[in-house]
């Protein structure tokens, strides 16, 4: 039993070490959160105003929303379908 516990502790410590080796950039988490939110919406699209009013908490400022959207557009996960009013649509993963 003692050897099993020692082995389990070793695996837990290894998992923690590997997780901490490559921390995820908070900006990427924020962009992923926004993408998930847009995908969950009707027609997988949202206006900039909707993002500011009811999007994920951290993207409810113009600066943060612009940064997250720029990252999503750069990675071709979202496209801007209208400039006035600003509208965004998630692109399919095909």
Image: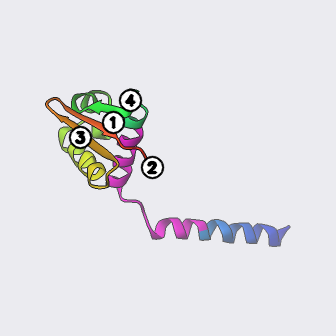
Q: Closer to the camera: disc 4 or disc 1?
A: 4
Query: Which numbered tag is attached to residue 1?
Result: none
Q: Is residue 10 left or right of residue 59?
A: right
Q: Earlier in the sequence, mark 4 or mark 1?
A: 4
How would you rate the neighbour count of disc 2 (Cα within 10 Å): few for under 14, some for 14-19, many for 20 or more? few
How would you rate the neighbour count of disc 4 (Cα within 10 Å): few for under 14, some for 14-19, many for 20 or more? few
In percent of width and height, residue 20 lies at 48, 66
Q: Is residue 63 inside the magenta stretch?
A: no
How would you rate the neighbour count of disc 3 (Cα within 10 Å): few for under 14, some for 14-19, many for 20 or more? some
Q: Which residues are magenta?
A: 15-36
| Callouts 3 and 2 close, C-beta under 8 Å | no
In percent of width and height, residue 78 lies at 31, 44
Judging by the rendered image, the residue that carries numbered circle 1 is 57
Q: CA distance from mark 4 to mark 2?
A: 16 Å
Judging by the rendered image, the residue that carries numbered circle 3 is 80
Position of 29 relative to 6 (above/below): above
Q: Closer to the camera: disc 4 or disc 2?
A: 2
Q: CA distance from mark 1 to mark 3?
A: 21 Å
Q: Earlier in the sequence, mark 1 or mark 3?
A: 1
Q: Earlier in the sequence, mark 4 or mark 2?
A: 4
Q: Quadrant of the N terminus?
A: bottom right
Judging by the rendered image, the residue that carries numbered circle 4 is 43
């Amino acid at each position: 039993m003692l050897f099993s516990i020692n082995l389990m502790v070793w695996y837990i410590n290894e998992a923690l070490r590997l997780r901490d080796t490559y921390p995820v950039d908070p900006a990427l988490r924020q962009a992923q959160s926004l993408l998930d939110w847009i995908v969950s919406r009707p027609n997988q699209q949202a206006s900039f105003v909707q993002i500011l009013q009811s999007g994920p908490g951290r993207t409810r400022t113009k600066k943060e929303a612009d940064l997250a959207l720029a990252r999503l557009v750069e990675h071709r996960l979202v496209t801007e379908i209208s400039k006035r009013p600003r509208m965004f649509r998630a692109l399919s993963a095909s």
